[in-house]
Image: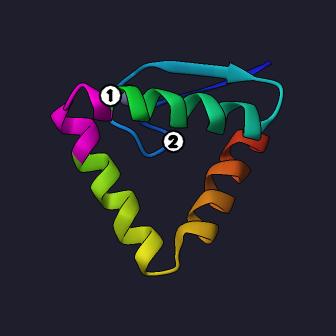
Amino acid sequence: MKSMTCNQLGGACEQVFSGETFDELAVQSQHHGKEMFGANDEPHMAAMGKMMVLMKSGEMESWMAARKAEFEAL
Ligand SMILES: [Zn+2]
């Protein structure tokens, strides 16, 4: 079992996600992000804005690959 925080996954808090695979963490992180977005949590809205920039610039895949490498290195 490995863990990463919301911050490490491009979010904005210290919430910890744990799982056997990076995909498991990604799902939890996305779910948490949606919840925070629904609650109009400002730091998470800003974090999501940065994600949108990454997505538009086409750098999302390499960014995700880097996060996954961090997970694998744990
Ligand atoms: Zn968070």
Question: Which dot marks residue 61?
Answer: none
Residue 22 against residue 5 in the figure, above or below: below
Q: Can see residue 35? A: yes
Give me the residue at 16% from left, 36% from top.
42
| Circle 1 or circle 2, nearest the eye | 1
Q: Please report contact status of discs 1 and 2: CB closer than 8 Å, yes or no.
A: no
Q: Is residue 42 magenta?
A: yes
**Would residue 74 be seen by someone viewing this image from the given angle?**
no
Left or right of 54 on screen, residue 68: right
The circle on residue 36 is: 1
Q: Residue sitting at 75 percent across and 23 percent down?
A: 19
Horizontal side of 74 relative to 48 (left or right) equals right
Total numbered circles? 2
Q: Quadrant of the C terminus?
A: top right
Disc number for residue 9: 2
- Magenta stretch holds residue 46: no
Q: Which residues are magenta?
A: 37-45
Give the x, y percent position of residue 34: 41, 34
Kindly state the secondary structure of the residue where label 2 is placed.
Answer: loop
The spot of residue 65 in percent (x, y) is: 68, 61
Q: CA distance from mark 1 to mark 2?
A: 14 Å
| Residue type for callout 1 | Met
In what element is the residue under mark 1?
helix
Residue 1, quarter of picture: top right
Q: Position of residue 16 (x, y in %)?
A: 53, 19
Between 31 and 4, the one nearer to me in the picture: 31
Ligand 1 resides in the quarter of the picture at top left
Which residue lies at the image location 28% right of the left edge and 38% below the top edge? 44
Residue at 39% across, 22% down: 14
